[in-house]
Image (cartoon, rainbow, N blue to C red):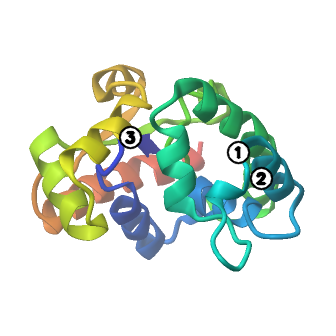
């Protein structure tokens, strides 16, 4: 499952989890890679310097985001450091899960060229106004910060073209849940084939 920045991937993932899906979240794994003591932590600090560290020597994710989302080369470098370990962990966890529906939530799935690793592609979408409102409320980001993050990803229309399923997350949580239940039924049916 993928989508654009702020489209509601986490909300959709939680609904799938409630229905019984096994989920693995690439963002959570990436955060784990940035913990002190990890190989990726050392590589990121070497690449971006002490300015991305807080007083306790932890990577300040906002400082790192400010550093990389305004420079495509820096973002690419960060992805080259973090993605290999995250991808290995996703594959390992999905393989070990013993449920019919297993979902990897990967915001940069298409950007990383990973779509062929999965049976189905679910794209969560929402319009610009909805994303701006939700992200400004939940993450206290302004439109410029949101647009910088949005520009670092493929346009939603491109992601939708490759999707097997699209979740339109512009409406209420009930609307989203209804769409996900329909997708769930199809995924369960597909898993029995």
| Residue ID at (85%, 55%) | 42
Evaluate if marks 1 and 2 touch, with contact meaning CB atoms under 8 Å apart: yes
The residue labelled by disc 1 is 48
| Residue ID at (76%, 49%) | 44
Q: Check the image and report above or below for 133 versus 145.
A: below
Please name whichever residue, 74 or 55, is drawn nearer the observer in this view of the structure: 55
| Residue ID at (38%, 26%) | 159
Q: Is residue 148 left or right of residue 99?
A: left
Q: x, y (%) of residue 62?
A: 49, 59
Q: Nearer the viewer, mark 2 or mark 3?
A: 2
Query: Badge 2 local density, few (<14 within 10 Å), some, or many (20+)?
Result: some
- Does label 2 or label 3 sit earlier along the sequence? 2
Q: Secondary structure at mark 3?
A: helix
Q: Is residue 183 left or right of residue 126?
A: right
Query: Badge 1 local density, few (<14 within 10 Å), some, or many (20+)?
Result: some
Alpha carbons under labels 1 and 2: distance apart: 5 Å
Q: Determine which of the numbered discs, if any, sits on residue 45 in the image.
A: 2
Please name whichever residue, 166 or 39, is drawn nearer the observer in this view of the structure: 39
Q: Check the image and report above or below for 159 versus 24.
A: above
Q: Check the image and report above or below for 175 versus 47.
A: below
Q: Nearer the viewer, mark 3 or mark 1?
A: 1
Q: Quadrant of residue 11?
A: bottom left
Q: Secondary structure at mark 2?
A: helix
Alpha carbons under labels 3 and 1: distance apart: 19 Å
Q: Is residue 134 visible?
A: yes
Q: Secondary structure at mark 1?
A: helix
Q: Determine which of the numbered discs, if any, sits on residue 149 in the image.
A: 3
């Amino acid at each position: 499952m993928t989508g654009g920045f702020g489209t509601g991937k986490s909300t959709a993932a939680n609904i799938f989890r409630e229905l019984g899906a096994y989920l693995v979240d690439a963002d959570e794994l990436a955060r784990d890679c940035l913990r002190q003591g990890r190989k990726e932590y050392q590589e990121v600090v070497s690449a971006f310097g002490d300015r991305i560290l807080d007083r306790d020597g932890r990577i300040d994710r906002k400082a790192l985001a400010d550093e990389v989302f305004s420079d495509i080369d820096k973002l690419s470098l960060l992805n080259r450091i973090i993605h290999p370990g995250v991808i290995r962990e996703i594959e390992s966890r999905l393989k070990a899960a013993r449920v019919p529906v297993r979902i990897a939530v990967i915001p940069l799935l298409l950007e990383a060229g990973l779509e062929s690793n999965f049976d189905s592609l679910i794209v969560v979408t929402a319009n610009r106004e909805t994303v701006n409102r939700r992200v400004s409320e939940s993450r206290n980001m302004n439109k410029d910060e949101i647009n910088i993050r949005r520009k670092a990803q493929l346009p939603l229309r491109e992601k939708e073209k490759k999707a097997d399923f699209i979740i339109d997350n512009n409406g209420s949580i009930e609307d989203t849940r209804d769409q996900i239940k329909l997708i769930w039924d199809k995924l369960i049916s597909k898993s029995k084939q």
